[in-house]
Image (spheres, rainbow, N blue to C red):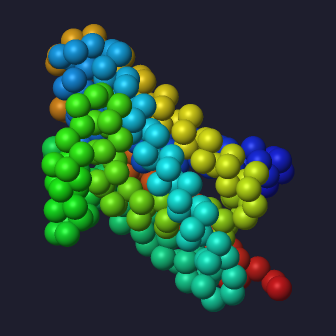
């Protein structure tokens, strides 16, 4: 992968991570499925567009505001280890999920109250704003991107400059919008076309993908520890 141009590596990193984050069934995917079956493709796609916009904003904030701190010395090593553990945790969480109605990326307590308050205050009426507010209130999405952005930069999958960061963010935008568009189309075909079992299976696949990434990441850490300096 390192033989590829850095900007292409960053873009592919964004596409893969954006897709893995989008697949697990949470509030946005369930909203798209329900509204797509009831109101059609256009309405569901606009919900997905709103969600994608907010997802990209969170990803951009993570890269510009937090990730660079984790690129040097012991902080970098600690971040790599933490990212490995976090990917394992998230992968097992998705893989062992038993219900599509349990949000995989939502924080509890104060974060849930914040989400409820945002929806109450903003009270979105349009499809686009519905998707945007749902992601805006899910603080877990921002936490996820902060951790991944730091890991991508520390692993040199994304170069710590504007071209690399923007390429990764663009990859996230492409993958997320493509997933939501495809889901909107499937939902518009009619209610019941995607059973809960099918949705849960997709979430399990996402978990398996994250576990594979975690194992690759762990193997890379071990290789770096044993290679001659």
Q: Is residue 116 above or below residue 222?
A: above
Picture quadrant where residue 158 is located: bottom right
**Residue depicted at x 60% and y 47%:** 169
Q: Nearer the viewer, residue 119 or 198?
A: 119
Q: Locate residue 208, reporting x and y percent.
A: 41, 49
The residue located at (53%, 62%) in the rendering is: 62
38 lies left or right of 229: left
Residue found at x 31% / y 23%: 44
The location of residue 106, given as percent across then percent down, is 26, 58
Image position of 79 with respect to 20: above or below: below
Residue shown at the point (20%, 69%) measured from the top left? 110
In this view, 124 is above or below 195: below
Badge count: 0
The answer to whether any part of residue 5 appears in the image is yes
Horizontal side of residue 65 vs 224, given as left or right: left
Q: Residue furthest bottom?
A: 74
Q: Is residue 186 visible?
A: no
Q: Give x and y (percent) for residue 63.
A: 59, 61
Residue nearest the viewer, comparing 26 with 142: 142
State left or right for residue 219 relative to residue 197.
Answer: right
The C terminus lies in quadrant: bottom right
Q: Position of residue 179 (x, y in %)?
A: 44, 31
Q: Residue furthest top?
A: 189
């Amino acid at each position: 992968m390192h033989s590829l141009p850095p900007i292409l590596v960053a873009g592919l990193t964004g596409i893969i991570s954006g897709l893995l984050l989008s697949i697990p069934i949470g509030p946005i995917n369930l909203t798209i499925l329900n509204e797509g079956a009831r109101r059609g493709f256009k309405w569901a796609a606009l919900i997905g567009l709103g969600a994608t916009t907010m997802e990209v904003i969170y990803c951009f904030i993570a890269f510009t505001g937090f990730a660079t701190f984790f690129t040097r010395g012991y902080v970098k090593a600690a971040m790599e280890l933490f990212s490995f553990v976090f990917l394992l945790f998230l992968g097992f969480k998705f893989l062992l999920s038993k219900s599509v109605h349990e949000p995989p990326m939502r924080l509890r307590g104060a974060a849930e109250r914040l989400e409820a308050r945002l929806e109450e205050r903003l009270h979105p009426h349009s499809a686009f704003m519905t998707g945007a507010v749902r992601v805006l209130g899910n603080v877990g999405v921002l936490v996820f991107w902060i951790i991944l952005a730091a890991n991508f930069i520390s692993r040199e999958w994304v170069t710590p400059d504007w071209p690399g960061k923007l390429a990764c963010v663009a990859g996230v935008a492409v993958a997320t919008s493509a997933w939501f568009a495809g889901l909107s189309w499937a939902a518009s075909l009619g209610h019941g076309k995607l059973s809960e079992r099918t949705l849960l299976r997709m979430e399990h696949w996402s978990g398996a993908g994250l576990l594979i990434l975690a194992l690759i990441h762990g193997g890379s850490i071990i290789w770096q520890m044993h290679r001659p300096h």
